[in-house]
Amino acid sequence: MLPVGAQSSLTGGATPRSDVVISTRALDRMSVPRADTVRVGAGVPLSALQRALAASGLYYPTVPTYDGAFVGGTIATNAAGAATFKYGSTRRWVEALTIVLADGSLVEVIRGEVTASPEGWFEIERASGERVRVPVPPYHMPDVPKLSAGYYARPGMDLIDLFVGSEGTLGIVVEATLRVIPKPRTCAALVQCGSDAQAVAATAALRSEAARAWCDAGPLDVAAVEFIDHRALAAMPDEAFARAGVVRPGGASAVLLVQIELPEPQETALERLHDILDECGILEDPLLALPGDARGIASLFELREAAPASVNARVGSAQAQVHPGIEKTAGDMIVPFERLADSLALYRGALERRGLEYAIWGHMSDGNLHPNVIPQSFGDVERGRDAILEMARGVMAMGGAPLAEHGVGRSALKQRLLLELYGERGIEHMRAVKRALDPEWKLSSGVLFAE
Ligand SMILES: Cc1cc2nc3c(=O)[nH]c(=O)nc-3n(C[C@H](O)[C@H](O)[C@H](O)COP(=O)(O)OP(=O)(O)OC[C@H]3O[C@@H](n4cnc5c(N)ncnc54)[C@H](O)[C@@H]3O)c2cc1C
């Protein structure tokens, strides 16, 4: 049985392989939001959730770039988005889950109610009254702001965290209680940089400003800094720029899209933004879409989205015209922010040494970038996979991880990366969790790891 949400997974996790597919689309109930939580069905798209919350002046901050994803799918993958920098990944916002286990038991898991025993296990009662012990894996997770790499595991962890990010292998989420916040006054600023180094330096400065704002010591509250490199810009069609009302940046530039939460009055914060960009040697004024200009803000985010859309279209046409085996070949790498410049050099080196065409974009304020191959042949896909393996080993050596937000799914490459991250013993510890909760291997077989 394979539970699916909006099937926007980039890992094949929601692509049936002769499974019985369980659509969650009809689980579309939503409670009237309270001041700080909302109860919501697994089949509610985030865009619909956001619209309903906005009517009450509220906001759910952990939205992946694709906001058509369903609540259940984002919990199953511990999805993260640009604003993870300020708000963390989905995990932090999940207060309670109603889950159907593989034997049909319906369990309610509320954050704070069940934690792992000091010996490292949970006890769960099935519908039949039978009690099962579920072991907590002893592996050490990398210390990065977002991770979607198999089962969460920490000493004394909360039971709810075992289900968040388990990609449907341990149970089916049917309803969730999510934390929400008052809707911030969001502004977007498009910043043109002359080089990768300048983009990294500006992001570092904006991160420091944000840290000051979060402890009331500064005016510039930055929630996210997104990055598009010059190669991704070159792959984007002219219409994408025209729609956003942006002149295509020339030369070797990169672009940052800064998401800012503006206080009222906003002048001091905007002055600070200009000062920081000046200090980083960025001479061109940023293109601003201010709170209230919903269309302008949406256009800038659409421009950001045009980067993956354009590359995906190139992959699709190569698949149709050159070789049916051509597919998306992309990394989802994260490093501690201090190693961001090194990681960019690592990605470019690994791809260029293999003679590959590529583009890079991603959530720069988290140190999370997506190097994407633009394959011209099936050989490029094979060389691209090899490059991703090299990048994975490189980021792990930097204290990072090769599986930041998209999960593992049924992708052979991502399962290989999971193996690189935790080793065969780590995977065996995950299998022990799976066996305890789903001994007949009914749910999402082949997702995360082979049976
Ligand atoms: C253009 C684009 C941009 C994206 N950007 C981001 C991004 O910024 N950040 C990010 O994290 N991801 C991103 N993604 C990937 C994807 O949107 C996320 O992984 C999202 O969380 C998947 O949600 P979904 O509803 O589509 O789930 P699906 O794709 O349907 O399912 C994903 C996995 O979750 C399981 N699952 C689904 N529903 C349930 C349920 N109710 N209970 C248990 N298991 C379930 C499925 O079996 C599958 O393994 C992007 C995808 C696209 C196409």
Image (cartoon, rainbow, N blue to C red):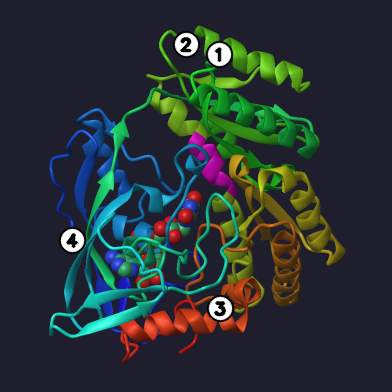
The earlier-in-sequence mark between 2 and 4 is 4
Question: In whole angstroms, how far apart are the C-alphas of marks 2 and 4?
Answer: 41 Å
Which residue type does callout 4 highlight? Leu
Ligand 1 occupies quarter: bottom left
Which marked residue is nearer to the observer: mark 2 or mark 4? 2
The earlier-in-sequence mark between 4 and 1 is 4
Which residue occupies 38% across, 82% down?
A: 434
The earlier-in-sequence mark between 2 and 3 is 2
Which residue type does callout 3 highlight? Gly
Q: Position of residue 168 (x, y in %)?
A: 35, 72
Determine the secondary structure under disc 3. Answer: helix
Determine the secondary structure under disc 2. Answer: loop
Determine the secondary structure under disc 4. Answer: loop
Numbered range of the magenta stretch: 301-307
Question: In whole angstroms, how far apart are the C-alphas of marks 4 and 1?
Answer: 42 Å
Determine the secondary structure under disc 1. Answer: helix
Which residue occupies 74% across, 22% down?
A: 282
Marks 3/4 in contact by CB < 8 Å: the verdict is no
Marks 1/2 in contact by CB < 8 Å: the verdict is yes
Circle 3 residue: 426
Q: Is residue 76 magenta?
A: no
Q: Position of residue 55 (x, y in %)?
A: 20, 31
Question: In whole angstroms, how far apart are the C-alphas of marks 3 and 1?
Answer: 48 Å
Circle 2 residue: 266
Give the side of residue 441 with respect to residue 224, left or right: left
